[in-house]
Image (cartoon, rainbow, N blue to C red):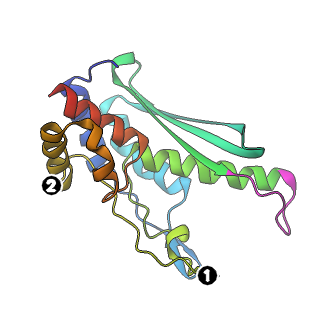
């Protein structure tokens, strides 16, 4: 694992802190607000472009357990390997969806996967989106996301530095961690 420099951590943390992507869309059927992939992109560009960064989002179909998923990758870069950040997001294609043809089903899955990848990269909390507000039988409250540069993050770092990385499961029992944030947490715990 390569060591992340302090400047790299600061840059990504600054970008994440500046990106504000409000949930500007409203689902009239489910009666909830949400943010689209386009909403996130519109919020990100004014923050990253003046810093000399750009964003690339790709997706591809992948088979997992006999089902087709769309894997999206969001890449934030300024053209150097040292300051390139990536996050993946996945969404499963529905086997069929009433009123949608195959290309629309793939397009919807692509849009969700891209949204999830962008949300992970820019540390956007989505605990009140459609997936969290549906009133299904399981009504367990969702754990909060553990985000860099917060009191909870700093406490988790101190705890893991004292008790060891093998206790990360205790942190995960209390907080949700994106893969990118888990890697950043491990780097901070082991290299600082």
Structural crowding at the residue carrying mark 1, measured as other residues with C-alpha within 10 Å and reported as few (<14), some (14–19) or many (≥20)? few
Q: Position of residue 150 (x, y in %)?
A: 19, 52
Which quadrant holds residue 5?
top left
Q: Secondary structure at mark 2?
A: helix
Q: Is residue 12 visible?
A: no
Q: Mark 2 or mark 1: name the one nearer the start of the chain.
A: 1
Q: Mark 2 or mark 1: which is in front?
A: 2
Q: Relative to 173, does residue 179 appear above or below in the rendering?
A: above
Q: Position of residue 124 (x, y in %)?
A: 39, 54
The residue at 20%/36% (across/down) is 164
Figure label count: 2
Q: Which mark is residue 151?
A: 2
Q: Please indicate whether residue 41 sits to the left or right of residue 145 in the image.
A: right
Examine the residues drawn in magenta and state their main secondary structure.
loop
Residue designated by label 1: 28
Q: Position of residue 55 (x, y in %)?
A: 47, 34
Q: Please indicate whether residue 91 sits to the left or right of residue 66 in the image.
A: left
| Residue 51 within the segment the image draws in magenta | no
Q: Relative to 65, does residue 170 appear above or below in the rendering?
A: below
Q: Relative to 148, does residue 30 appear above or below in the rendering?
A: below
Q: Position of residue 133 (x, y in %)?
A: 51, 76
Q: Nearest the camera: 13 or 89?
A: 89
The residue at 38%/24% (across/down) is 78
Q: CA distance from mark 2 to mark 1?
A: 36 Å
Q: Please indicate whether residue 16 sits to the left or right of residue 127 in the image.
A: left
Q: Secondary structure at mark 1?
A: loop
Q: What segment carries the magenta color?
A: 92-102
Q: Are marks 2 and 1 in contact (CB under 8 Å)?
A: no
């Amino acid at each position: 694992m390569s060591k992340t420099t302090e400047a790299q951590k600061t840059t990504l943390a600054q970008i994440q802190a500046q990106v504000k992507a409000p949930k500007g869309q409203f689902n009239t059927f489910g009666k909830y607000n949400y943010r689209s992939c386009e909403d996130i992109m519109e919020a990100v560009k004014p923050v990253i472009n003046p810093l000399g960064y750009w964003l690339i989002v790709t997706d591809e179909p992948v088979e997992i357990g006999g089902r087709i998923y769309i894997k999206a990758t969001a890449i934030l870069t300024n053209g150097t390997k040292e300051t390139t950040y990536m996050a993946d997001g996945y969404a499963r294609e529905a086997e069929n969806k009433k009123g949608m043809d195959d290309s629309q089903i793939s397009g919807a899955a692509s849009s969700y996967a891209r949204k999830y990848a962008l949300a992970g990269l820019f540390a956007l909390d989505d605990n009140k989106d459609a997936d969290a507000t549906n009133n299904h039988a399981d009504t367990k409250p969702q754990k909060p996301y553990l985000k860099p540069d917060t009191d909870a993050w700093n406490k988790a770092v101190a705890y893991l530095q004292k008790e060891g990385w093998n206790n990360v499961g205790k942190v995960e029992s209390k907080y949700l961690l994106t893969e990118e944030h888990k890697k950043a947490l491990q780097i901070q715990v082991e290299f600082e």
